[in-house]
Amino acid sequence: MKINSKYVQGMAALALLTSMNACKPKDAGSVVSGDAAAKVYVAPGKYDEYYNFVSGGFSGQLSVYGLPSGRLLRVIPVFSVDPEKGWGYSEETKPMLNTSHGNVPWDDLHHVSMSQTNGEIDGRWVFANGNNTPRVARIDLKTFRTAEILELPNSGGNHSSPFITENSEYIVAGTRFSIPPDDKNGDVPINTYKENFKGTISFISVDKTSGNMDVAFQLQGPGVNFDLSHAGKGKSNGWFFFSTYNTEQANTLLEVNASKRDKDFIMAVNWKMAEKLIKEGKGRKQAVKYASNRFDESTHTATSTIKNQVTVLDIRDFPGLVYMIPCPKSPHGCDVDPTGEYIVGSGKLAALIPVFSFDKIQKAIADKAFDGEYDGIPVIKYEAALYGEVKKPGLGPLHTEFDDKGNAYTSMFVSSEVVKWNVKDLKVLDRVPTYYSVGHLMIPGGDSKKPTGKYLVAYNKITKDRYLPTGPELSQSAQLYDISGDKMQLLLDFPTIGEPHYAQGVAADVIKNNSTKFFKIEENKHPYVAKGEKEAKVWREGNKVHINMTLMRSHLTPDNIEGVRVGDEVYFHTTNLEQDWDVPHGFAVKGALNAELLVMPGETTTLKWIPLKAGMYPMYCTDFCSALHQEMSGYVRVSPAGSNVPISFSTGTNIAEKDKAVANSAAAKK
Amino acid sequence: MKKLLSLSIITLIIIAAASCGGSSDSEKTTEATTESTASTDSDDGNPSYDPHRGEGKFTSVDISPTLDAAKAELGNQVSQVKCSSCHKLTDEKLVGPGWAGVTTRRKPEWIMNFITNTDVMINKDPEVQAQLELCLVRMPNQNLSDEDARNLLEFMRQNDGVK
């Protein structure tokens, strides 16, 4: 066959033209284009633009990533013990994991909210929920450590949490599983759900200065499942919106029995009114038991306090406090746009996204445009509250974030995509695939009054073939998109810890200059601190042996300890004397049924050890600290129970007589 | 033949796409490299370093021929917490060199600059660098206040026999 050469040249030229265009992708299907690498490249020694705080899901921890690089900067232990950092193993941190059930060393951390001032992220604290044994934690962004954990009474699973008001007045915590209230007998047949089970929402106050949390009051309502929430903002500040499911009140096979109704509800709560009712003394005092755990930075020690009472408002007793808005098909995400006017409900089994109008809701309440009641709560007519519906967005809408240009981005779990739509005209503008089964989304500031418009991260539930196989379990994946143009562009995949749920992001400048570099040794008020080697000592109190030890490059003081007996409770109170950034020392002792300590400069931390066998026990610094790190070690001699070896301790002087003579003559020569 | 044609078109597209991505990548890399080289240069050059004064906020320190005993005592207290785990008061080396004679070997400004601007001086001062080769442990910045530094100097003077 003879080829028409002109034809071939023409085709080639056309191909070139087409491929030039491919550099700036126009179609939503393009996966990764040529400039993606440059957009996520952060040169060695340079900083990322954003901090990204990502829930660690069933790891119970909070991870910190840099964006756009996707580099993991830190894993902050929150609800789960972390032997690497001694979290939950040191005497000082054990009280942080105390609950009314005792020490609970794990939880399921789903959602994160950063503190806000005037509706903008202020970079002071991150709050996180414990889903299993209901708790809320506060992480201090000066130290990147968990500063407080508060347990929640009358709660069966803290899922609808920790959503925050625009001036951080309250964090809410709605129970996912309704249960009989804590002061009632819970020993009832499970199928008495409808009569005995209640759904509770806790309002947690946040002290403006210290950040300390308390259960300010609780709302008690019908037994349903509270799923997610968001506070109103701007014009709707003063209201809270909660998605609910299982309004069928099923107690078994929820997959079928809680999916029967065409619509569940978004519950609108007038929290300013609730606050007023509480001030007027309208609340009912209820006997409960819950733990409030706080870490004191001056003593470097946590204290757990059990509290015994909460104030409860029964929703049905206060008309005007709560309204129900019908929302199709088991709504999940409940997201409020930056203006506070639009409330987006995402029915996870629906094929449309309803958008409600705050103004219309207010008008419907004034006009009493109700469609009956649910458990004594007025139900607003769907059409009376509805602004409009996003038609055919995709399958399985879950969560919506907002940008700075009036657009919304909704994750579609079933169809594995992110869909961008305009909040005003509800038209779909763009869609990109995710790999795979996207859950949450995050735009820095994307649920605040001041969203950004540069990046979006999708947190996917399933990874499959995205990374090298690592056996049956694969790390979940996050995907970074550039959203600065009309079309979204996939830039990067990066693995996450646990299963990521909600995340938050903020410009690095809001946080980075406030970071604590070390703790001032002068301000250390730990009862067993040794401020200098002169204060290092070992002493016995009955079967307890206390060791006030100092850590300094590159020795432990004391590093020779004798007189410990089998069965003694030995407490190593280690003080790091360094006063410089990034010089922690570690501490470990052989055979301890415990973990290591990681002691920050200026901090005192305690390891408890009960030796079970006589013998010689080395101890050493675990965190490479200097060229002589391998020398930073010592011995503890353990004698049998009842032995009369006296307590003795030293550094540098415990030398055999015959070696002393040699040492002295060497010194004399010098 | 049709097959061959479409094959060559695909090849062309691939080449074009690859070159597009590649060029913008390498551009960025070069930029970053140049930047970091520039900053290294300015660190190394350092013609203005004064080995007698060191580098830091102290240009001249007023000292009296007699000892301020109150200051020296405060300096002693700071030393217990922040210094004595590495420095003896004799001429014997522990982690770092012993303190005996230091106030006769070094100017007061040098001492106060070194104990407050430690990292910079370790990187620049020839004598500190020689010392580092012996001790092998970089002296940490112990975050002393100006007052702490002055009191420590007085304590070192006392240790060297000033009355």
Image (cartoon, rainbow, N blue to C red):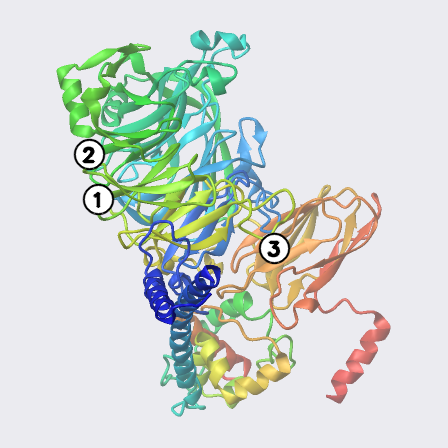
Q: Residue A478 at x, y = what percent?
A: 46, 48
Number of marks present in the image shown: 3
| Residue hosting label 2 | A341
Point 54% across, 84% down: residue: B160
Give the image quarter of residue A341. top left
Q: Nearer the viewer, residue A640 or A322?
A: A322
Q: Is residue A217 visible?
A: no
Separation (CA) of disc 2 from disc 3 = 54 Å
Q: Is residue A100 visible?
A: yes
Q: Mark 1: which amino acid?
A: Gly
| Residue hosting label 3 | A574
- Helix, strand or loop under label 1: loop
| Residue hosting label 1 | A406
Q: Mark 2: which amino acid?
A: Glu
Q: Specify which label sits upstream in the sequence, 2 or 3.
A: 2
Separation (CA) of disc 3 from disc 1 = 54 Å
Crowd band around label 1 with a 10 angstrom C-alpha radius: few (<14), some (14–19), many (20+): some
